[in-house]
Image: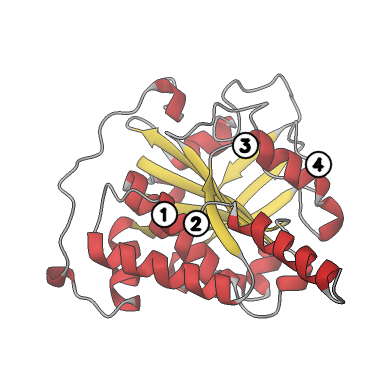
Amino acid sequence: MPEGSVSLLSDLGLISRQARVPRLPDQLDIKFGPLEALGRYVLRADRMLRDNGIRVSLCTDFGEFVETNRRKRNRDWFSPLPCFSPQYATLDERNAFWLKGVNAAGDTVMSHAIRLYVWPNTTLKAEIESLRLLYDVVPDAPNARGEATAPTAARMSGRVGLMGSLWLDPDYRGGKLASTISPLTRAVALARWRPDYCCSIVFQTGIDKGRAALYGWPPQNVERAVIFSNLPGFEGPPLDCSLCYRTTAEIEEVVLAAVGARAGETSRTTAVPGPAPVALGVAAE
């Protein structure tokens, strides 16, 4: 065997493993929003991440998500909220997805999850304080608590996307890739679901370090506070957080501005989001 052949074959194997992972632009079926602008936006974000060694795909297997998190705890990835675990929530392609990023070896090095709720008769505040936000069936846990004093939580209803578990392997941090990942997740949610809001519950320690701006949340859309404690199925400290959010119109504005388009310069889908079945997290009234 010629000198260097083993190394070359090994390199080809790594490339092959990454190439077997679907690419997000090939997976995305744009059902809502500005068609061309969203397509260009996703391609641009995908290229940015690929240039940094990460191949991104859209996944709806939350069993894999939870297992990957378990394996990566030693890589500075906290336990996900129970609403992103199949043990506590009904999660499928209709109401949830996560962006999975792999390196050249096919190893997962990036994650970001989002779940769609449809609340015609309730609000984010009510869902937090009843713990229905986190559990399809609220467990019997007298010490578990949720509290929402963020003003917008009391009026956030309709179609709401809750984002969480944004994680980058430590080897990929420092380049502000999160400023691409979080807006990309919102853009994909817009294309798939057209939620009225996308929101996230962000640790206050992260807010104090400037992560809200890094994730693309404008300061006027960051509100105190959301607090959880003693949550069954959550392996972590009490959550002292702020509510961060964007409306559909704001998400569209970000997409259009990023690709240099204006609202009247790109065609739009005509589909209208329909009613969601109970599996999509409609609160029982």
How far, Cα to Cα, is label 1 from label 3?
21 Å
Counting other residues with Cα less than 10 Å from the Cα at mark 2, is it few (<14), some (14-19), or many (20 or more)?
some
Q: Front-most of 174 and 41?
A: 41
Number of the front mark, 4 or 1:
1
Number of the front mark, 4 or 2:
2
Please identify the quarter of the rendering in which residue 145 is found: top right
Q: Disc 3 marks which amino acid?
A: Phe
Number of the front mark, 3 or 4:
3
The residue furthest front is: 1
Counting other residues with Cα less than 10 Å from the Cα at mark 3, is it few (<14), some (14-19), or many (20 or more)?
many
- Report the residue marked by disc 2: 23
Determine whether label 2 and label 1 are within 8 Å by CB.
yes
* Disc sitting over residue 26 in the figure: 1
Secondary structure category for the residue under label 4: loop
How far, Cα to Cα, is label 3 from label 2?
18 Å
Q: Earlier in the sequence, mark 3 or mark 2?
A: 2
Across and down, in percent, residue 201 comes to 58, 53
Q: Earlier in the sequence, mark 1 or mark 3?
A: 1
How far, Cα to Cα, is label 4 from label 2?
32 Å
Please identify the quarter of the rendering in which residue 10 is found: bottom right
Q: In the drawing, does residue 148 fall left or right of residue 260?
A: right
